[in-house]
Amino acid sequence: MALQDILGTNRPSRPPGWPLPPPSKMVATAPFSLSHGTTTLAFRCSHGVVVAADTRSSCKGLICDPASRKVITLHQHLIATTSGTSADCAAWLRVLRCSLRLRHLHEGQQPSVAGAAKLLAGLLRACHSKDICVATLLCGWDHTGPSLHYVYSDGTHLSGDVFSVGSGSPYAYAVLDGAYHYNLPVAEAFALARQAVAHAARRDAYSGGSVDLYHVQQSGWICVSREDVGQVYQALGETAEREGIREEEESGKTQTGLNR
């Protein structure tokens, strides 16, 4: 039995009174720029790469998603942060994941983190005039140890020890520059990453939500925690207050000893 026999030959193709929009040859662009921002960061340590990001996705003055994921896994030893246009970042990192998988199947081993960054930079450079906004940190572990690379949509490719990307990055750098060093213990490295994102979210209107914390080790990446950024900032204030009281008590004891 044909489909038209079931539906009936006299059945209208669409409900009456629902006119279709006129055909358009191209999609109109927004008459204004869409503001967006984020805070993502990563730094290398002797034990791996510590990665942190906020979870607020915004479009101009609208918070589209307070609990988005800005850390994308590419394979067991490589993850990437997203900053810029969410759709562009997701699409191009999906392309990179597929390309890395094909290279793995063809060569029998995963490309290095530097190789993955060069591959993505080359793909983006070929489309630099297409109004794409992608800024990502590739964080992984390969035969050279912990590795960190920054790639931008114009084909820029940089390697380094500390990177922060997004509208909240100046505030994050203010925290990182004063406390980071390569031999940070694991617990102190995690606390520093949380503190940097929390301070950035406090000052930057486009950053907020929660703090996602990841750690890339020789055995692979792990998701350490997701904590509300407000609670993290409050805990930092309480810790600073306790330290201030302790310093005042120690100073008072020292002064009393001198008077004796």
Image: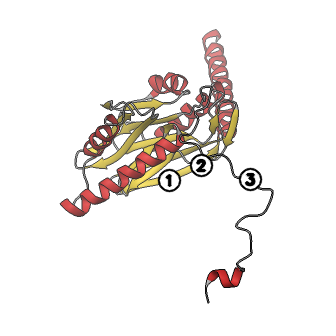
What residue sits right under mark 1 in the picture? 223
Q: Residues within 10 Å of mark 3 (few under 14, many from 20)?
A: few
Q: Is residue 11 above or below residue 2?
A: above
Residue 219 on image: x %, y %: 35, 57
Q: Identify the amino acid type marked 3.
A: Pro
* Residue at left offset 18%, top offset 59%: 107
What residue sits right under mark 3 in the picture? 19
* Residue at left offset 61%, top offset 31%: 30
Rendered image quadrant of residue 34: top right
Residue 237 on image: x %, y %: 67, 30
Its colouring scheme is secondary structure
Q: Identify the amino acid type marked 2.
A: Arg
In the rendered image, the quadrant that contains the C terminus is: top right
Which is nearer the N-term, disc 1 or disc 3? 3
In the rendered image, the quadrant that contains the N terminus is: bottom right
Looking at the rendered image, the disc whose residue lies closer to the viewer, 1 or 3, is: 3
Specify whether 186 is left or right of 53. left
What residue sits right under mark 2 in the picture? 226
Instruction: Pick the residue in front: 132 or 15.
Output: 15
Q: Identify the amino acid type marked 1.
A: Cys
Rendered image quadrant of residue 233: top right
Q: Are marks 1 and 3 in contact (CB under 8 Å)?
A: no
Looking at the rendered image, the disc whose residue lies closer to the viewer, 2 or 3, is: 3
Residue 170 on image: x %, y %: 51, 22
Mark 2 → mark 3, Cα distance in angstroms: 47 Å
Q: Are marks 2 and 1 in contact (CB under 8 Å)?
A: yes
Residue 159 seen in render: no
Secondary structure under the numbered disc 1 in the rendered image: strand
Which is nearer the N-term, disc 2 or disc 3? 3
Instruction: Pick the residue in front: 240 or 220.
Output: 220
